[in-house]
C-alpha cells in the first residue's frame, strides 16, 4: 500500500511555542475598572479619626461599633430637636389661646371667690327688714317676729327660721324674701283672702277659701258675709262657695251679706239690706257669671230687683 505523503511543515521559526507567543489583546470598555492596578489603602485624616483607629485607617471592631452608636445617637438627638422646633412653630397660636383662656378662668375664679367671700361677710349683714304686701296684718308685729335675722349676712338668711316666725300669723298665705345689698331684707307677703264668717260654738270664725281659720269674734264681723254651708269647711259645697266669692268683683263682693250652699251646684248669694238673691248655681264659669251679674245689676239695681239668676251665663234673668 502506498503511504500518503506528509504535509508540508512550517519553518522552525514559525513553530514557536504557545508560551512564547504574546497574548491576544482584548479591547476594554472605557468604564471598566482596571483590577490589575495596585490598591492604595484609605487613610482617615487625624482630625477625623475619633474612633481610636489605627493610622492606616482600619478601626478595631469595638471602636467602630462605639462610633456608629454615637453617630446614631447624635442624629437621633438632632432629629428630636428639629421635630420639637417644628411642633412649637406650628402650635404657637394654640398655646397663646390656651394661655389666654387660663388667664380668663383664673380671673373669673378670683372674682367669684371674692364676691362669695364678701357676700358671706359682715359687710352685707341685715340692718333693716321691710315687710310689704300687707293690708290686714300688723307690719310692726311681723317685723318684730323677724328680728332674729338682724345682723345675719344676706346670703345666710335662714329661710326655715323666717317660715317659723311667719307661721304664727294665720293671714300669711305665702311669702318671698328679697335681698337688697348691702343691708336690706325685703319680705313680700301674700295675705289670705277671707270669704266670710262661719258661726261656731265659739262665735263667728272668719275663714278663707281653703277653710283656714283667720280669726274668731263673738259677733259677726263687719264686712264679712255669713256662710251657711252644709257639711262645714271640708265639704264640696264649701269649696264651690269659696270659688264663687273669690270670682266676684270688689264692688259686688262688698254688697254680699250672706252665702248659702247645700250642694256644689246651688250656691246662692244675698245682697245688702234689700235682701235680693243671686242664684249662682255651680262654681263653673264663675268669671263669666260675674260679668253677667254686674251688667244685670247695672240695669236693675238691687232695690228694684228681688232675684238675679245667672245659672246660665248666656241668659241672665232678673225677677
Image: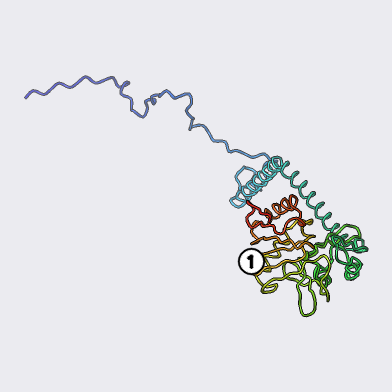
Count the marks: 1
Q: Position of residue 213 (x, y in %)?
A: 77, 72
User: In the image shown, does 319 or 220 lie closer to the viewer?
Assistant: 319
Q: Looking at the rendering, which quadrant does residue 28 occupy? A: top left
> Can you identify the residue that label 1 sits on?
264
Callout 1 environment at 10 Å: few (<14), some (14 to 19), or many (20+)? some
Closer to the camera in the image, 274 or 138: 274
Please say if 188 is above or below 167: above
Indicate the position of residue 160 as horizontal and vertical percent values: 80, 70
Q: Where does the N terminus fall, quadrant-wise?
A: top left
Picture quadrant of residue 128? bottom right
| Percent position of residue 168, x then y | 82, 73
Furthest residue to the bottom? Answer: 201
> If the image is split into quadrants, where does the C terminus sit?
bottom right
Task: Residue at 74%, 61% (x, y): give it.
Answer: 276
Decide: is 112 above or below 99. Answer: below
On screen, residue 271 above or below 233: above
- List x then y, in percent, for residue 96: 76, 43
In the image, farthest residue toward the left: 1
Residue drawn at x 71%, y 43% is 94
Q: Secondary structure at mark 1?
A: loop
Query: Of 83 and 35, which appears nearest the observer?
Result: 83
Nearest the camera: 204 or 162?
A: 204
The residue that appears at 69% across and 74% down in the rendered structure is 232
Q: Is residue 285 left or right of residue 22?
A: right
Amino acid at each position: 500500500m502506498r503511504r500518503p505523503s506528509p504535509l508540508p511543515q512550517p519553518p522552525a521559526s514559525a513553530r514557536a511555542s504557545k508560551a512564547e507567543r504574546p497574548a491576544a489583546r482584548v479591547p476594554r470598555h472605557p468604564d471598566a475598572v482596571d483590577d490589575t492596578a495596585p490598591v492604595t489603602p484609605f487613610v482617615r485624616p487625624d482630625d477625623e479619626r475619633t474612633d481610636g483607629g489605627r493610622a492606616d485607617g482600619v478601626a478595631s471592631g469595638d471602636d467602630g461599633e462605639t462610633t456608629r452608636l454615637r453617630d446614631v445617637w447624635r442624629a437621633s438627638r438632632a432629629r428630636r430637636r428639629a421635630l420639637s422646633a417644628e411642633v412649637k412653630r406650628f402650635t404657637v397660636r394654640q398655646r397663646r389661646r390656651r394661655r389666654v383662656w387660663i388667664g380668663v378662668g383664673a380671673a373669673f375664679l378670683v372674682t367669684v371667690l371674692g364676691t362669695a367671700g364678701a357676700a358671706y361677710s359682715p359687710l352685707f349683714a341685715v340692718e333693716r327688714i321691710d315687710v310689704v304686701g300687707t293690708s290686714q296684718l300688723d307690719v310692726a308685729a311681723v317685723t318684730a317676729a323677724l328680728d332674729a335675722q338682724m345682723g345675719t349676712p344676706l346670703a345666710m338668711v335662714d329661710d326655715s327660721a323666717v317660715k317659723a316666725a311667719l307661721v304664727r300669723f294665720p293671714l300669711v298665705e305665702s311669702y318671698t324674701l328679697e335681698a337688697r345689698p348691702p343691708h336690706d331684707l325685703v319680705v313680700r307677703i301674700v295675705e289670705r283672702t277671707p270669704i266670710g264668717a262661719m258661726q261656731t260654738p265659739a262665735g263667728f270664725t272668719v275663714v278663707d277659701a281653703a277653710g283656714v281659720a283667720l280669726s274668731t269674734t263673738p259677733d259677726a264681723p263687719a264686712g264679712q258675709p255669713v256662710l251657711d254651708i252644709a257639711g262645714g269647711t271640708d265639704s264640696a259645697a264649701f269649696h264651690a262657695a269659696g270659688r264663687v266669692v273669690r270670682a266676684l268683683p270688689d264692688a259686688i263682693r262688698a254688697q254680699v251679706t250672706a252665702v248659702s250652699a247645700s250642694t256644689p251646684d246651688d250656691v246662692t248669694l244675698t245682697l245688702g239690706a234689700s235682701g235680693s238673691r243671686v242664684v249662682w248655681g255651680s262654681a263653673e264659669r264663675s268669671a263669666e257669671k260675674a260679668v253677667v251679674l254686674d251688667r244685670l245689676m247695672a240695669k236693675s239695681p238691687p232695690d228694684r230687683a228681688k232675684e238675679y239668676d245667672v245659672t246660665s251665663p248666656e241668659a241672665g234673668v232678673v225677677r
